Image: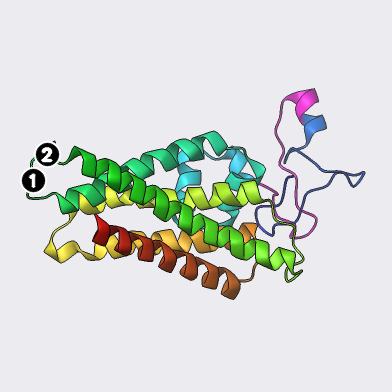
């Protein structure tokens, strides 16, 4: 499915069938020129991001622009890249947890604890995603939402939002007593990204998406707190 990144309306061809490309395919085949098509709903280009460099798309994702999320999660296939980024973020998340608890120890002295922290990071992530998916499924089951949800795509989107925690590495490297707000800022960015992903892919309104994002993040921090006490 291809949608307009601006308004979210599905793009159809002249026959009313699903259109896969966001440019004039006939013109491209005959001349090699890419001409972006316009959305019949909002009259803007369906997906301007196909002409953007990857770093510019990433910048708009960081700035929380919904069109960039629709482009990356719906119109393009980035599943493998998202999985790789999520795995790297899990390693960074685990290292940050381990380093903060091991500041007064030798680097290799508590190797086993690093693996425990990795397990805790995975558990926190799974709890966060599971709660989001369960709430969305509940709404779908009881017909409280009329929008069909693509759960694999929503899962990928929630993994993408988790990747914002990679910024914890900067908070760890630059962290001092006067910059402790960096940790809260990274968590806020994670919360805001989860909100945008839910709003775009779940069919929820802003209030519902915010509520789900907050509940799932509270559960994540609860797992973190209990895991910290156990470890």
Disc count in the image? 2
Q: Is residue 27 left or right of residue 95?
A: right
**Few, some or many residues within 10 Å of mark 2 (<14, 14–19, 20+):** few
Identify the residue position indicated by label 1 in the image. 105
| Residue name at image x 37 percent, y 66 percent | 222
Task: Give the farthest residue toward the right.
Answer: 15
Asked if labels 1 and 2 touch by Cβ distance under 8 angstroms, the answer is yes
List x then y, in percent, for residue 183: 27, 61
| Residue name at image x 74 percent, y 38 percent | 21
List x then y, in percent, for residue 6: 65, 57
Asked where in the image residue 9 lies, by quadrant, the reply is: bottom right
Position of 100 relative to 221 (above/below): above
Position of 35 relative to 177 (above/below): above
Residue 41, magenta (yes or no) = yes
Asked where in the image residue 136 lies, by quadrant, the reply is: bottom right
Look at the image and name its color scheme. rainbow
Identify the residue position indicated by label 2 in the image. 109
**Few, some or many residues within 10 Å of mark 1 (<14, 14–19, 20+):** few
User: Which stretch is magenta?
Assistant: 28-47
List x then y, in percent, for residue 100: 18, 53
Q: CA distance from mark 2 to mark 1?
A: 7 Å
């Amino acid at each position: 499915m291809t949608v307009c990144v601006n308004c979210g309306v599905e793009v159809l061809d002249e026959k009313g069938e699903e259109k896969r490309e966001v440019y004039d395919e006939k013109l491209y085949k005959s001349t090699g020129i890419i001409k972006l098509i316009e959305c019949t709903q909002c009259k803007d280009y369906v997906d301007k991001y196909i002409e953007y460099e990857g770093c510019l798309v990433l910048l708009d994702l960081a700035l929380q622009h919904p069109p960039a999320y629709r482009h990356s999660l719906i119109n393009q296939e980035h599943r493998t890249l998202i999985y790789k980024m999520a795995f790297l973020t899990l390693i960074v998340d685990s290292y940050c947890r381990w380093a903060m608890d091991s500041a007064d120890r030798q680097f290799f002295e508590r190797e086993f604890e690093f693996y425990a922290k990795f397990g805790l990071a995975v558990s926190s992530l799974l709890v966060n995603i599971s709660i989001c998916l369960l709430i969305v499924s509940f709404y779908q089951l009881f017909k409280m939402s009329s929008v069909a949800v693509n759960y694999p795509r929503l899962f990928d989107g929630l993994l993408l939002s988790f990747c914002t925690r990679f910024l914890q590495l900067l908070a760890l490297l630059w962290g001092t007593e006067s910059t402790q707000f960096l940790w809260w800022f990274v968590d806020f960015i994670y919360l805001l990204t989860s909100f945008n992903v839910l709003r775009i892919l779940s069919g929820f309104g802003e209030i519902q998406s915010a509520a789900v994002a907050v509940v799932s993040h509270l559960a994540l921090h609860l797992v973190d707190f209990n895991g910290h006490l156990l470890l």
